[in-house]
């Protein structure tokens, strides 16, 4: 099931390498706050997390066996960090490079 779900996401490795995966299915609910609270609670216990973008919500619902009117709102992956939780061990730029993120200058424009 996890492999089928991972195939429906933009970054499937996040889910395939996770120790816990949560697919949030809700209607009329603030998925952002729900996800944020789970992620903050996990971080408080030393667990890292990642929200995963869904490229095919219909297939994701099929992978989870959801009814026709139910939709996956967001998929969260959780795991213990490989090197422990030491945010101060690298600069923000180093963390971004190691995560294969775009440089800040490509995603933020000063006005």
Image (cartoon, rainbow, N blue to C red):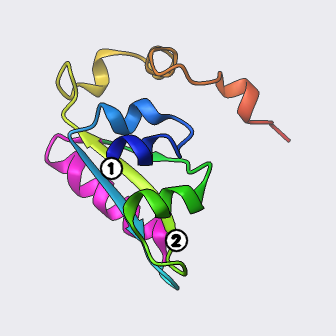
Q: Residues within 10 Å of mark 2 (few under 14, many from 20)?
A: many
The image quadrant where one finds the C terminus is top right
Marks 1 and 2, how far apart at CA: 16 Å
Residue 102 - label? none
> Which percent across, then down, holds residue 2?
33, 45
24 versus 47 height, above or below: below
Which of 60/53 is in front? 60
Secondary-structure class at tag 2: loop
Which residue position holds label 2? 71
Which of 108/7 is in front? 7
The answer to whether residue 33 is magenta is yes
Residue for point 51% across, 65% down: 73
Residue for point 47% across, 70% down: 31
22 versus 82 height, above or below: below
Residue furthest to the bottom in view is 28
Which of 103/99 is in front? 99
> Which percent across, then down, holds residue 50?
40, 43
30 versus 2 height, above or below: below
Q: Is the residue under label 2 in contact with that under label 1 (CB below 8 Å)? A: no
Q: Count of labels shown?
A: 2
Which residue position holds label 1? 1
Is residue 101 found left or right of 13 in the rendered image?
Answer: right
Give the quadrant of residue 91: top left
Which SS does the magenta portion mostly show? helix
Q: Residues within 10 Å of mark 1 (few under 14, many from 20)?
A: few
Secondary-structure class at tag 1: loop
97 versus 78 height, above or below: above
Give the quadrant of residue 107: top right
The earlier-in-sequence mark between 1 and 2 is: 1
Tell me which segment is drawn in magenta: 30-48
Give the quadrant of residue 87: top left
């Amino acid at each position: 099931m996890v492999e089928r779900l991972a195939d429906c996401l933009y970054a499937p490795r996040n889910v395939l390498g996770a120790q816990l995966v949560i697919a949030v299915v809700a209607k009329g609910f603030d998925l952002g706050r729900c996800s944020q609270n789970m992620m903050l609670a996990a971080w408080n216990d030393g667990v890292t997390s990642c929200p995963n973008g869904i490229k095919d919500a219909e297939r994701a619902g099929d992978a989870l066996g959801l009814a026709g009117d139910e939709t996956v709102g967001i998929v969260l992956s959780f795991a213990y960090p490989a090197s422990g939780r030491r945010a101060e061990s690298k600069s923000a730029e180093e963390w971004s490079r190691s995560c294969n993120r775009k440089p800040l200058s490509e995603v933020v424009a000063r006005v």
